[in-house]
Image (cartoon, rainbow, N blue to C red):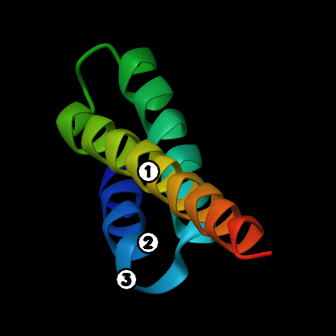
Amino acid sequence: MAIASLILSISSFFFFYLVGAILGLIFGYISLSNIRESEGRLKGEQLARAGIILGWVNIGLFFAIFLTSFILIISMF
């Protein structure tokens, strides 16, 4: 699941945008929880964290671009 989080978060920059970022966050947090509960049997904590970080970065960029576009459109009138 950590790999799915990372793949979705990376692909959200190119294909799925907000949906991919949100799914990457969900899979990342679920996989981190599973890894912690496994007490060392499962690996991939760094992949899950990278997926979470990229997901939040993509959401932040999405809203920054959205707000900038909104402000530019409003200033034209």
Does the residue at mark 3 contact the one at mark 2 (Cβ under 8 Å)? yes
Of the residues under marks 1 and 3, which one precedes in the sequence?
A: 3
Q: Give the Cα distance between marks 2 and 1.
A: 8 Å
Q: Residues within 10 Å of mark 3 (few under 14, many from 20)?
A: few
* Residue 61, above or below 56: below
Q: Give the Cα distance between marks 3 and 2.
A: 5 Å
Q: Which residue is mark 3?
A: 14
Residue 5, how many percent across, how many down?
40, 55
* Residue 1, above or below 15: above
Q: Residue 76 versus residue 68: which sits nearer the camera?
A: 76
Q: Which mark is residue 12?
A: 2
Q: Which mark is residue 39?
A: none
Q: Which residue is mark 1?
A: 55
The C terminus lies in quadrant: bottom right
What kind of residue is marked 1? Gly
Of the residues under marks 2 and 1, which one precedes in the sequence?
A: 2
